[in-house]
Image (cartoon, grey):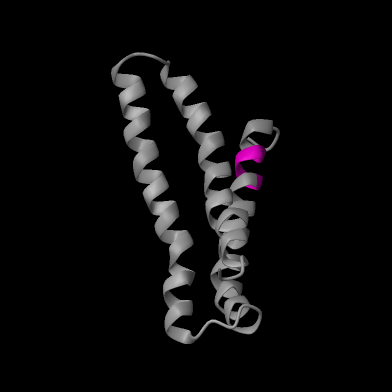
């Protein structure tokens, strides 16, 4: 197991995802308060949006994966590989750069 490259890739990937999640969880409210000057009530709701989006993304992707398997459009291995890659990237975009960019746009 110690020499398995795929295992180490999974371990490093999971550690990076957990680290990013912890940084977002602890730093986002402070950032929104000090830099974007949101009040506490607005800050609480907006801080929860990335996590709600990640939850919705995971539920929708599960339904899509099941339908691909049920219709036999892709193999189980292909579905697992595709949704592992898009799940990690989609969650990063949803939680990090995507919504972070929207929050920094000026009010019109």
Please tell me which residue is depicted at 57% across the width and 66% down the height of the picture: 103
Q: Is residue 30 above or below residue 50?
A: below
Span shown in magenta: 8-12
Q: Position of residue 36 (x, y in %)?
A: 61, 78
Is the C terminus in the top left, top right, bottom left or bottom right quadrant?
bottom right
93, 9: nearer the viewer: 93
18, 30: nearer the viewer: 30
Which quadrant of the figure has residue 22? bottom right
Q: Is residue 79 above or below residue 48?
A: above
- The main secondary structure of the magenta stretch is helix
66 with respect to 5 (left or right): left
Residue furthest left as drawn: 70
Residue 4 visible to an observer of this rendering: no
Q: Is residue 73 above or below residue 17?
A: above
Please tell me which residue is depicted at 62% across the width and 59% down the height of the picture: 101
61 with respect to 107 (left or right): left
Residue 55 visible to an observer of this rendering: yes
Q: Position of residue 79 (x, y in %)?
A: 45, 24
39 with respect to 20 (left or right): left
51, 105: nearer the viewer: 105
Please tell me which residue is depicted at 66% across the width and 79% down the height of the picture: 35
Q: Position of residue 29 (x, y in %)?
A: 55, 77
| Residue 84 located within the stretch drawn in magenta | no
Is the N terminus in the top left, top right, bottom left or bottom right quadrant?
top right
Please tell me which residue is depicted at 64% across the width and 53% down the height of the picture: 16
Label count reads 0
Q: Position of residue 19 (x, y in %)?
A: 62, 60
22, 5: nearer the viewer: 22
Q: Is residue 6 above or below residue 19?
A: above
């Amino acid at each position: 197991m110690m020499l398995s490259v795929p295992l180490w890739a999974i371990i490093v990937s999971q550690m990076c995802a957990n680290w990013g999640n912890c940084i977002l969880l602890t730093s986002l409210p402070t950032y929104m308060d000090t830099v974007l000057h949101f009040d506490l009530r607005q800050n609480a709701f907006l801080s929860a949006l990335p996590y709600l989006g990640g939850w919705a993304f995971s539920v929708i992707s599960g339904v899509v994966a099941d339908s691909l398997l049920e219709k036999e459009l892709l193999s189980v291995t292909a579905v697992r590989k595709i949704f592992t890659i898009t799940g990690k990237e989609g969650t990063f975009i949803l939680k990090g750069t995507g919504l972070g960019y929207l929050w920094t746009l000026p009010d019109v």
